[in-house]
Image (cartoon, rainbow, N blue to C red):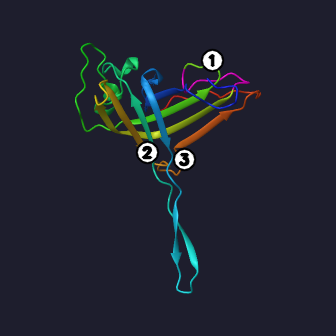
Amino acid sequence: MTYSEGVFSEVALVEVQAKGGTAYQFASIIEEITPNQGDKDGEGIALVNGGRLWKRTPEGDFEITLKIYPTDTRQASSMDLSQGFQTTDDNWDATSPYSDVNSRNREDFRIAILWTDDATATTASGTTVAGNMSRRLVFTQAYMTSYKESFDDKIVSAEVTFKGPAFNKAGTGNVTRQSAAYGGASGLSALGNYT
């Protein structure tokens, strides 16, 4: 999945798992991935003596945007993400014809994005073979805040947005980066189940 120049390009794996639910792979319907970690911003405070103090702003929320091409509403077969927006993992419709009705439910998801030149890798949360370049971003406590369908370029598409806090209630970070170097002695380990 890499060029000989040592950059990640073109191909990635993307996994979405509801907390306590099943992990599904969505790379086959995704055109674009835009993961954004929140800024650790701040501002200068002017003092009356002409000096400045730096006022830190807590790290902002993260946001992941996916442009997808859904074919039907079967979330279980990685054809769409709409049921994750509409219902909870326990209530996804798995029987044809598929139907999902909007609700007040808000699912807690883990999003894993993997770039690697390991041709045997098939899931974003799985292992990668030692010696292969690998880079994985993991976002936990991600909430699907937007699912917008479109037909503006004469093809059905949707823009899906996940957002979440930088830290959980206990102060543990919700954004993890992992990598393994080319020629390294070990690859990435598999992620545990998101519970």
Q: Residues within 10 Å of mark 3 (few under 14, many from 20)?
A: few
- Type of amino acid under label 1: Ala
Q: Which residues are magenta?
A: 123-132
Which residue position is annotated with label 1? 119
Based on the displayed image, in which of its 4 quarters is residue 125 positioned? Answer: top right
For marks 3 and 1 on the same chain, the one whose residue lies earlier in the sequence: 1
Magenta includes 91?
Answer: no
Marks 2/1: CA distance?
31 Å
Q: Label 3, label 1: how many angstroms apart (C-alpha)?
A: 30 Å
- Which amino acid, mark 3? Gly
Residue 95, x across and y down, in percent: 28, 14
Q: Secondary structure at mark 3?
A: loop
Residue 164: x %, y % from top left: 43, 45
Above or below residue 116? Residue 148 is: below
Tag 3 residue? 173
**Does residue 40 show up?**
yes
Q: Are marks 2 and 1 in contact (CB under 8 Å)?
A: no
Q: Residue at x 25, y 39 (%)?
A: 104
Q: Position of residue 142 (x, y in %)?
A: 43, 40
Residue 164, labelled with which disc? 2
- Please name the amino acid that badge 2 sits on: Gly
